[in-house]
Amino acid sequence: MKRILTVILCSAGLMAYAQESTNKNPFRQLKQELPAPNSYRTAAGFPGHEYYQQKADYVMNVEIDDKKQILAGEETVTYHNMSPDALPYLWVQLDQNMRAKDSDTKKIAQSSIGESMSFDNLKRMMNDFDGGFKLDFVKGMDGQDLKYTVNKTMMRIDLDEPLKSGESFSFQIKWWYNINDRMQIGGRSGYEYFEEEDNYLYTIAQFFPRMAVYNDVEGWQNKQFLGRGEFTLPFGDYKVSITVPEDHTIASTGVLQNPKEVLTAKQIERLEKAKTADQPILITTQAEAEKIEKKKATGKKTWTYHAENVRDFGFASSRKFMWDAVGVKFGERTVMAMSYYPKEGNPVWEQYSTKAVAHTLRSYSDITFDYPYPVAISVNSKSIGMEYPMICFNYGRPEKDGTYTARLKYGVISVIIHEVGHNFFPMIVNSDERQWTWMDEGLNTFCQYLAEMEWDVNYPSRRGPAYKIVDYMKGDKSNITPIMTNSESIFQFGNNAYGKPATALNILRETIMDRELFDYAFKQYAQTWKFKHPTPADFFRVMEDASATDLDWFWRGWFFSTDHCDIALNDVKWMQISDKNPEKQKPFEKKIAESKEDFVGDIRNESNAKNTVVERDPSTKDFYNSFDPYKVTDLDKSEYKKYYDKLTAEEKKMLAQKKNFYELNFELIGGLVMPVILEFTFTDGTTQKEYIPAEIWKMGNKTAKKVFWFEKELKSINLDPNLETADVDRSNNYWPAQVVPSRFELFQQKERESENEMQKSKRSK
Amino acid sequence: MSITDMEYNEASKSLQISMKLFADDLEFVLEKEQNVKVFLGTEKEHEKADDFIKSYLNTHFFIEQSKGSLPLTYVGKEIDKDYTWIYIEVKNFKVKVETLLTNSMLIDYFKDQTNKVNYKKGDEVNSFTLYNQNISKEF
Ligand SMILES: [Zn+2]
């Protein structure tokens, strides 16, 4: 036992030594963490001179079987190899296979049974839904079968000849699958069933075999789809024909090509009017929709859509849809902001959805680039929020009596801003969601916060301000991962990939960089990578390159670590300049000496003074026994005069000023370096703010001192007064120290002082 | 995630607990348990909302000393935008006695739910996180 202990101690000692010899400075550059710049991606974070990206075009016919809830389709894919490499095989994504009976998603999902379990949870866990793609064929354009291999959610198509650089390859796939019931087994897409009138509302996405991305960073991005890490897809042009029951209304990615065949003359006229209207116009009214949903037509209709330069395609279909629209101008161009919703979404949806879409387009365009697509659509869909190019599915259903809570209202506006906002990140700035959730969710949540603040300055935003991330950041580190973690391995998804990066960007904008520098760099990133595939390094680099701000320490702390910020104001020393005038200096020194605390022994010995040797035998006394060090002598005075006369006029003026000097001692308790922001309050009640950049910690120091001087005398100091740094412990941020009352105590005080709003309203009845 | 701050108050010899939960999540769970709409924090709030919370607490939050559960006093709740705060007091709490805390709030409905607890005693803070497979902690 003892020997083992010795060995462990030894190796622990060695490890400590090894660690000490590596650079731990929080300001060291990110050279090892980021990939080396090359001809595809530059050190400035821009596409290099050899940057390339692949393209995939689709022509598709799909049909919904509303009786059996089956989606069937046939597609022709044309893949353009713009890379310098010859490709012996192509990878196609089969996301629906995640719902196959034997999918890895089900196998690795952790399940456990608590003391009680709801029926919904039980159904989800035990579902035996027969999902996944059923492939009828995979053929070349000559009609010959192609050799292919399905590995779970990925399909490899083997080519006879490698596809050379600059060449294109077309092939056809015929497929079908059972559409999942979203309410029973979940999912981003699927159907919702309305028992009352036996109707379905389909929100269809990830519904066809889609080309994977091939690029300079990942090769083929064929990491399996497990459900969380969403998608990255090549851009391309789509021509899609969708066949549905003739009384269905479709909402879709792209521009409708055959309005005269599928819309009524009245609808076409209303749409035209909506283009220039300043309020949304109903294309299908609630009364019209309620009439349609009560009957079931037997015929079919085909809606044809074209979409250019998109990375995906989604649509929704139902006989329950109301539909409204309004035009949003971008220069000469008019973008149609539109919403589709069943009566169950009203009254909230009619009042807010399309307005939220239009607001999002304007707000996001201001900070990135003008929204380039012709339409932006919000579809009401129970319980979810999910984005596809030009179209998204959003939750929000008021009570049956038409009432709703403020939380529901803001929830609806927020989810619409968020999902429409995803058009910018990642639909257009096409980051790799399978790898990095934060690159689209974090950037989008940040823009969402800005858009919410523009909707209403008192908007109850859930994520954005620094203080809202504190609880997460001070949490148990074993339950936190750095932002730079693969999408499938993130703990606390919402805080990690949405809240923390959004907060970090907000801190950069408000506190570290300032709005002007940040906004220019952020816009540069968005415009540079619009319709391209950026990586985290590209983002980090552009933000620095366009602003001349070394942010490596910030990326390291906020994105590569789980450290939190805790800075303490430990001690404050107050000093005034001495002008060396003995007539002032000596009484001051005396006062200080007298004000010092007495040692307990001295106090007790005082009573024994009469019995000491010097008192009993006066011959033991000499000069020093009666010398008063605080007495001002003539010599003192003449020396002071000599000293003073030698001073220059300027020095004399400095001495005449009565400045108060304060030496502040800071300690960096948390691992995250952040600026030191101070608010000084003077005895006359006035205040003054000071900002010390984070570089005060640049030597890797854990403590720092800084002297401030003022005419006035200080009453108090508050560190981080506006809650900008996400400091997790504010109890050490005050001088003089302040006792921060606990929440419990505050609540008890409030209870004692007054009755609550509900008691008041009850009493008033 | 929920956060529970527990602090021993020397003056009242009691353990003062404030628990912060996502309002939506708590409301969802209360509605599932009671099968009625609760409308927490609105004018329409169910008149028994506090009783619902108490009864849910009584089956999901325990503090045991010397092998017996200590009685919890429900002090009240506060709803603040996204969060609901629940205040609980444990009278006659003995600081020096070994204590077993169980906090399985919301875990039965949200398997990802984590419940963080900060126990403050003087200057010392003891923090731990409880979750699905681990709902109790001795301190
Ligand atoms: Zn999102």
Image (cartoon, rainbow, N blue to C red):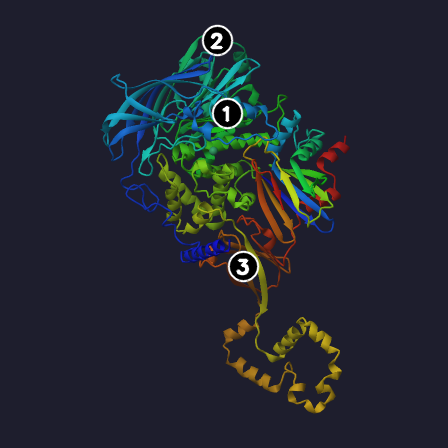
Query: Which quadrant would residue A314 be assigned to in this image?
Result: top left
For numbered disc 1, what is the local secondary structure? loop
The residue marked by circle 1 belongs to what chain? A
Whether A392 is drawn above or below A735: the answer is above
Q: Is mark 2 within 8 Å of ligand 1?
A: no
Asked whether disc 3 touches disc 2, contact meaning CB atoms under 8 Å apart, the reply is no
Task: Please state the horizontal and vertical placement of residue A37, each as a whole percent of the image.
Answer: 31, 46
A717 or B9, nearer to the observer: B9
Image quadrant containing the C terminus of chain A:
top right
Q: CA distance from mark 3 to mark 2?
A: 75 Å
Residues tagged by mark 1 and mark 3 found on one chain of the structure? yes
Q: Can you say whether A590 is above or below A710 in the image? A: below
Amino acid under disc 3: Phe
Q: Residues within 10 Å of mark 2 (few under 14, many from 20)?
A: few
Q: Earlier in the sequence, mark 1 or mark 2?
A: 1
- Picture quarter containing residue A438? top left
Within-10-Å neighbours for mark 1: few <14, some 14–19, many 20+: some
Callout 3 environment at 10 Å: few (<14), some (14 to 19), or many (20+)?
A: many
Can residue A370 be seen at all in this image of the molecule?
A: no
Mark 1 or 2, closer to the camera: 1
For label 2, the residue is A297
Tag 1: amino acid: Gly
Label drawn at residue A666:
3
Residue A186: numbered disc: 1
In this rendering, the answer to whether A16 lies above or below A368 is below
Q: Look at discs 3 and 2 and give the one toward the viewer.
A: 3
Question: Where does residue A633 sit, x and y in percent of width and height?
Answer: 62, 85
Mark 3 belongs to chain? A
Residue A669 visible in rendering:
yes
